[in-house]
Amino acid sequence: MLKNIIWCAYLFCAVNIIWGCGILPFIPAVGTTVFDGFVGWKGRQAVKYYAEDIATMRRAVMQSSRQVHLKIVHKSTEENGYSLELECKEPLQIDILPFEKKITKVMIKISLLGDKQFADFFYQMIDANVAKIRRGIR
């Protein structure tokens, strides 16, 4: 058994020396879910999936909008989720929708493509607030 482990470690090091770090993306990350960490863009709409329930995500989005001092112009509760319209230079709409049982989809619709950096920043704020909610910090 120990020989097999040593042999695999040796083979792994040899492959990394030959190909560099190009082999590392094929090794799955330990402790993360498939849904964390990726923002998909299509036109003026960004989508990010979170491994949290919809109530936690709504709370994190509301805290993020308060921290950035954005005024909520319109709130609507749909059957399956929430929709918020925030007052910015240009209108900003955020939809919080359930995707699966414990997975929530957060979509940010922006009116200008130049606001992509702001949407990415807002997702970082949401990430930070989700982490605080997980730890129990208000």
Image: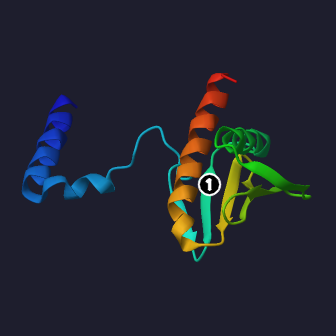
Residue at the spot 31% in from the left edge and 55% down from the top edge: 25
Image position, residue 4 (x, y; %): 19, 38
Q: Residue 67: where, in percent of width, then height?
A: 66, 38
Task: Name the one closer to the observer, 13 or 32.
Answer: 32
Q: Quadrant of the C terminus?
A: top right
Residue 20 picture quarter: bottom left
Q: Left or right of 28: which side holds 125?
A: right
Q: Residue at x 23, y 56 (%)?
A: 23
Farthest-out residue, front:
89
Look at the picture and state if 128 lies above or below 94: above
Residue 46: x and y in percent read: 60, 65
Specify the amino acid type for callout 1: Tyr
Q: Is residue 119 above or below residue 103?
A: below
The residue where tag 1 is placed is 49
Residue 51 seen in render: yes
Around disc 1, counting alpha carbons within 10 Å, would you say few (fewer than 14), some (14 to 19), or many (20 or more)? many
What element does badge 1 sit on?
strand
| Residue 52, position as x, y percentages in the image | 68, 42
